[in-house]
Image (cartoon, helix red, strand yellow):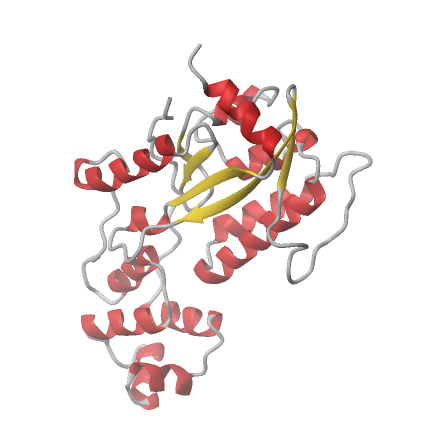
Amino acid sequence: MTASLHPTARPHPSTPLPFGEHLRHWRQHRRLSQLDLASEADISTRHLSFVETGRAVPSREMVLRLSERLAIPLRERNTLLVAAGYAPMYRERPLDDPALASARQAVELILKGHEPFPALALDRHWNLLAANAALPHLLAGADPELLQAPINVLRLSLHPRGLASKIVNLAQWRNHLFERLRQQIAATADPVLAELLAELQAYPLPEGADDTHLEGEHLGVVMPFQFRTAYGVLSFISTVTIFGTPVDVTLQELMLETFFPADALTGEVLRKLLSPA
């Protein structure tokens, strides 16, 4: 079974800003001086200053060059293009759009091919787009409200009425997720992710949970995900896959998370659960 590839809600757009303010925001977010950015973009510092203050209008090529040097996500590059007076360049389509058929087939191939182990496709805000048949076996007992579309997998995982009480190493796992979110926020400057992080951090730890905070390198080789089930404690490690060199907003923001058994018991349990009757 594969979950439906439903679109997720988008936040209301903010008040439009002049191009120069957008550019200054991203330059400062990347912690670059005007001299640094001008050197990387092969333009004069004076011209860059004029662009930021609105005294000069950048060409379309200049907008794209600056966006590339600042590693601005495609969604925000469209915002910069519009602010500079140009049409958006990068399309955004739902994953079930016919134009994305080959990408959708690749996603479904990965999800199906990963069975009997869990795999899921997520959008930029960690909302579930699709999953394979193994995932529902891990969701038993979660509050039905948290399973209403769009399902946010971070909220579902860490909410007290979600799966939090079943995660053996909850404190370690949630700090691992927090660090991933911080890295994503640093890369995208997405206010929705910042709000999500604040919400998740406010969730209480169940009584008796170890609140050890991991700094720097994770213990061991990779961070395990240990989960209580009726079949015993299942242990996983996970990988994240993204599309290389996407020119579509949806594909750039798509993440595929695949979970692998970290011990023999986990592999055996999942194979039995998904084996034909």
- Say whether residue 138 is visible: no
Query: What is the quadrant of the C terminus in the image?
Result: top left
Percent position (x, y) of residue 80?
A: 30, 64
Quarter where residue 108 is shown:
top left
Give the mark count: 0
Quarter where residue 224 is shown:
top right
Query: What is the quadrant of the N terminus in the image?
Result: top left
- 85 or 151, which is in the foreground? 151
Percent position (x, y) of residue 95?
A: 28, 37
Image side of residue 170 versus residue 275, left or right: right
Percent position (x, y) of residue 218?
A: 65, 56
Q: Residue furthest top?
A: 277
- 206 or 277, which is in the foreground? 277
- 75 or 269, which is in the foreground? 269
The residue that appears at 29% across and 50% down in the rendered structure is: 249
Quarter where residue 48 is shown:
bottom left
The residue that appears at 38% across and 81% down in the rendered structure is: 37
Query: Where 181 sits versus 6, above or below?
Result: below
The residue that appears at 33% across and 31% down in the rendered structure is: 5
Query: Where 142 sits versus 107, above or below?
Result: above
The residue that appears at 60% across and 23% down in the rendered structure is: 142
Percent position (x, y) of residue 120?
A: 43, 35
- 75 or 17, which is in the foreground? 75
Query: Where 254 sits versus 226, above or below?
Result: below
- Say whether residue 102 is visible: yes
